[in-house]
Amino acid sequence: MKLSEFDFDLPERLIATRPVRPRSASRLLVVTPEQIVDASISGITDYLRPGDRLVLNDTRVIPARLSGQRTRQGDAGQTSARIEVTLLSVDVDGNWQALLKPLKKIRDGEVVVFDAGLEAQVLHRSEGVATLQFNREGDAFDAALAKVGAMPLPPYIAAKRAADERDKEDYQTIWARRLGAVAAPTASLHFDSALLDQIAAHGVTTSFVTLHVGAGTFLPVKTDDIADHKMHAEWGEVSARAAAEINATKAAGGRIIPVGTTALRLIETATGADGQLGAWTGDTDIFIAPGYQFGVTDALITNFHLPKSTLMMLVSALMGRARIREVYAHAIAQDYRFFSYGDASILLPDGVD
């Protein structure tokens, strides 16, 4: 299957650089095999059944972009360089993998100094990624990061404007709990407390899982044959409670509807060949493309994705490539807002009723 099969032309004006407010004012495109319906996320219960279960990713985005100073003493005296840091992931020793820019301006062993007393030593560099050891850990690190860090907006937004204080609220779900993501599970950004209450009153339940979304989610697919693409790994966890809730819903005839591709990828990773979801912890690099057989997912709430992205392949696996092409053509024609701060869709392979 060729990468070009997942391409489309998107007018730049449809790339959202700010979300709508309130969150539940976003538009919703309802997609079944037979229908494409323009709606609002505030009316999503019209397309949910009592007994359905939404699966929500409770990861919390860290303010992962930092700007610091490297100072070096040489024969010509002291020199300094501004170093931009984007945190990617933390390892078992508490050290961070990070992108440094410009990488050529820093050496192994040197220290980058930030505001709020935060410092990071470069332990080593490999394949464009540096390993950093910070001088603070735990709550002290989180507090310093909150002061000096900026939200890691996606490249297509960051190219248009810098992150600001508003993004610290906008680029975070209202149920965000477990720190570790450097990108938001953006389909969840449409939900506010009033909408959750409305969904619960409709008889739809929720379960929480965790997938710490990594910066690799923005990396382009570089192989012409998508079968040659290697996914980035992300850490996730499905608790025994969440697994039991989801299995019970399936057994009772309810639908399992992940809110976002991150939640979908995680529960599909944790689903066995028998269709039962188990408690699971680890790194997942699952790649879902047309031909994939879904184990537990019945439908999906998601945003509109980048051309030639793995997420275009995922939604094509769920609804079919031809149908997704029709859906995206409709969304563009109707001026839906695209990508992280854009509008939502609900994909229902088996229809509404």
Image (cartoon, helix red, strand yellow):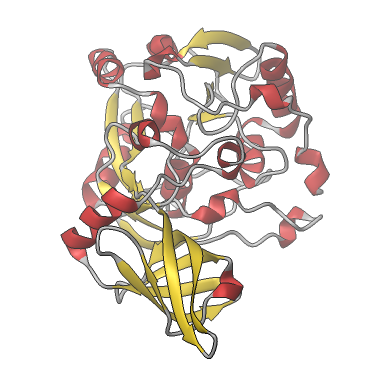
The vertical placement of 253 against 208, above or below, is above
Image position, residue 227 (x, y; %): 73, 57
- The answer to whether residue 91 is above or below residue 219 is below
Give whichever of 154, 162 is nearer the camera.
162
- Taking the view exactly as shown, the residue that stands out farthest to the front is 76
Residue 54 can be seen in this image: yes
Would residue 129 appear left or right of 225 to someone viewing this image? left
Q: Residue at x 69, y 32 (%)?
A: 320
Q: State the count of labels.
A: 0
Of residues 24 and 113, the one nearer the viewer is 113
Left or right placement of residue 195 versus residue 267 in this view: left
- Is 82 situated left or right of 181 in this image? right
Q: Which residue is located at x 69 percent, y 28 percent?
A: 324
Above/below status of 192 relative to 156: above
Residue 142 on image: x %, y %: 24, 56
What residue is drawn where x is 32% and y is 55%? 237
Residue at the extreme bottom of the image, as rendered: 75
Q: Nearer the viewer, residue 316 or 141?
A: 141
Q: Nearer the viewer, residue 238 or 252?
A: 238
Q: Position of residue 43 (x, y in %)?
A: 41, 9
Where in the figure is residue 342, as x and y percent of width and height?
A: 54, 25
Q: Is residue 128 visible to us here?
A: no
The quadrant holding residue 242 is top left
The quarter holding residue 209 reads top left
Classify residue 33 as left or right of residue 150: right
In the rendered image of this protein, does residue 348 appear above or below residue 6? Answer: above
Residue at the extreme left = 139
